[in-house]
Image (cartoon, helix red, strand yellow):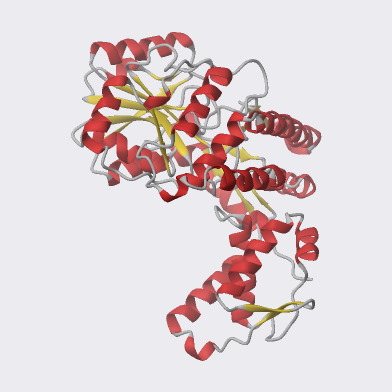
Amino acid sequence: MLTYDFENRGKMSLYEYLYKCIKDDILSGKIKAGEKLPSKREMAKNHNISVITVENAYAQLIVEGYIFTKEKRGYYASRISGDYLGENIKKKNMARSVEHKKQWLVNFNSNHIMYDNFPFATWSRIMRQTLLDQENSFLTSPVPNGVAELRNAIADHLAHFRGMEINPDNVIVGAGTEYLYSIIVQLLGRNTVIALEDPGYKKIGKVYESNGVKCLHLKIDNMGINPENLTGSGAGAVHISPSHHFPTGRVMPVQRRQMLLKWAKENNGLIIEDDYDSEFRFSGKPIPTMVGMDSTRVIYMNTFSKTLAPSIRIAYMVLPDELMDLYHKKLGFYSGTVSGFEQYTLANFISKGYYERHINRMRNYYREYRNKIIGAIKQSDIYEKVTIEEENAGLHFILGIKKDIDDESFKAVLRENNINISGVSDYCYNKLEEFNHKFIINYSAVSEEKLKKALDIMNKAL
């Protein structure tokens, strides 16, 4: 039986990873020409994935000619001659093959969600119904800021879940947050300096800077970015994640939020509120948003990649009235970047209550899974040497090391033992010693059994 390690697939979807693994095994000769592949059900059961995932991978392999079917007999590997691949392609395939063979015992850097809990049956049913209900709508050009049905569904969801009263006409739907960042840049102008959190998610700064914007990296304290550091900095906007900061997991208190809003008002500035990961809060009520405090100075952003799947490339933002008017005047000629079919499907998924039920189910699942992971740490010998911080929200927490260690040497020893881990300091732009000896534990894809072995190795390394 073909067996692949899905924990090491990075950002690839399940079916993409399975497709690549089988393709590489055929190209390398590991799977011989004419060899029969496992049935879809056998492959799905062996890897604990859905049959639809296997079906999609097999379908792509058939289209590209790597496998073929025999009626009522199954799937077979095609005969592929390496003579026509070319040296560059051969080298790439060899490199990928080596990459696939690199199997981490535990990969604390992997923060993908548990795809097997995705409501495939419900999603498929809604897709079929959407085809019937919206067949004529698919023939028209996508609306620049998103179809009205999805914008209305998002507004209703935010009102119910986050207590936000927003105008659906102020919602912009886009294919991922990177696209929305570029829209913000065009609205604010490339001369606008944007302040970012330090430490923080570095991809945000890279996207802004690739669009020609200067970024400032301001150190956070226990309450987030200090508005005093914004005064005189030249920043015209500040990008923050007040409800669950990455990577520290800190929550910005209301006093600091008020201070930032005061700075924005007095300096004609804007706050970009990134609410990513806010749905997975395990204790207390959801943290109120800043846009609910002042909708004229805050751009609100969120995405469905964490709650549903990264392959569903749908994100959205809510603009203040003034910026929305500017968007229509300046960028209204843009075509929508998300297919209408996907938008109508997601709109139905939300409006019919499936999305909220899915979030509630996943929140309970991850709460229990987090408890098991933390319980394993507390029962291990390493527990007396570490602290567990900011574990009440999101799909990661911080493991602090009580003793003075060299972080890079510690990570190197773990990598040699097939444990992949990052420190909070890896997300710092400036050297901030207070974030040393703190490591990020993304737990959503960690095997409990393998975790126990990893903890023993980490304890010995300390």
Is residue 262 among the parts visible in the rendering? yes
Residue 334, image x, y percentages: 29, 43
Numbered marks: total: 0
Q: Residue furthest left?
A: 191
Q: Is residue 232 above or below residue 1?
A: above
Is residue 406 among the parts visible in the rendering? no
Q: Is residue 138 left or right of residue 332?
A: right
Residue 123, image x, y percentages: 65, 44
Residue drawn at the location 59% of the way across and 46% of the way down: 132
Q: Give the image quarter of residue 179.
A: top left
| Residue closest to the eye, 348 or 325 | 348
Residue drawn at the location 26% of the way across and 42% of the way down: 333
| Residue closest to the eye, 94 or 60 | 60
Q: Quadrant of the N terminus?
A: bottom right
Residue drawn at the location 29% of the way across and 31% of the way down: 194
Q: Is residue 200 left or right of residue 97?
A: left
Q: Is residue 350 above or below residue 203?
A: above
Q: Is residue 455 left or right of residue 263?
A: right
